[in-house]
Amino acid sequence: MGAKVKRKRFGNFQSSTSVVRYMRTRIDLSQTEVCKCSGWNFRPNDISKVERGIFNIQVGKLKKIAEFFDISIDTILKNDFRAIAPALPADRPERQEKAKSRREKIQKKMDEAGELGEKIVLEMEKERLKPLGLDMFVTADYADDESAGFDIYSFTENAAPMHIEVKSSSGSDRQCFISANELNYAAFCAENNCPYKFVRIRNVFDKEKRQIKTFTAQELLQMKREAANYLIKEDW
């Protein structure tokens, strides 16, 4: 086996500040695509490590990664952005159009996952309430109203109004995004004992792998959360 570069981490080094990640995204390639395009024997995980400032890979692999982007190993190790200037690719309209198209496809799939998830839960609720004659009152009209704080208007077995928030994903992701308004509405329901359900659906497009789980407002509020966005209020 070839020698390995000594393991090293920059104190505050993140993949988003890596010269390797910067070069890779400038030419619009994924880590897997870099491996395929290069034709060399390394894995996406090797690229990922280098982008995170972890250099415990074989020197030969690090050298090949440097050669692929036409930069030096020293530039990678020092994370020297000024040194990559001669190797920067020109921004081409076709590359920008490709990136735009890819973003639109991702957003479209996310929207489709959300719509299908809401449709699935809507039908489940109608089926559940059919024996009680309440199925005709269940509606998903609130799904298009971001200010509502929930997606589906339904009812309990006692005919009490119940609000449902649905979060769906195409894969088996163990996390999802929820807005501050949606979270605040769940908190309002928990504090006021209002009937509420949070429905999480994974693998929404695959009937065999699809997973559906329901949580109460209290259970949702107890889940681990990370702030993904902040609203900045300007005072000028």
Image (spheres, helix red, strand yellow):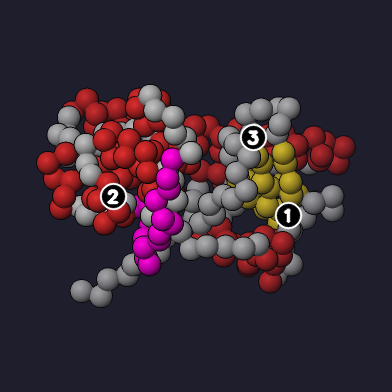
- On the picture, is 82 further left or further right than 39? left
Q: Which element type, helix, strand or loop, lies under badge 1? A: strand
Q: Earlier in the sequence, mark 2 or mark 3?
A: 2
Magenta span includes 124: no
Q: Which residue is mark 1?
A: 215
Q: Earlier in the sequence, mark 1 or mark 2?
A: 2
Q: Could you tell me if residue 115 is visible in this image?
A: no
- In this rendered view, identify the residue nearer to me: 202 or 178: 202
Above or below, 226 relative to 126: below
Q: Range of the magenta residues?
A: 2-16
- In this rendered view, identify the residue nearer to me: 15 or 151: 15
- Residue at (50, 48) in percent of width and height: 145
Above or below, 155 relative to 67: below
Proximity of marks 2 and 3: CB atoms separated by less than 8 Å: no
- On the picture, is 80 further left or further right than 175? left
Magenta span includes 10: yes
Q: Which residue is mark 2?
A: 76
Q: Residues within 10 Å of mark 3 (few under 14, many from 20)?
A: some
Task: Give the label on residue 151, or none.
Answer: none
Residue that sits furthest to the left in the current view: 86
Task: Give the label on residue 203, or none.
Answer: 3
Give amino acid for label 2. Ile
Q: Could you tell me if residue 5 is visible in this image?
A: yes
- Residue at (39, 51) in percent of width and height: 5
Give amino acid for label 3. Asn
Q: Residues within 10 Å of mark 1 (few under 14, many from 20)?
A: some
> What is the quadrant of the C terminus in the image?
bottom left
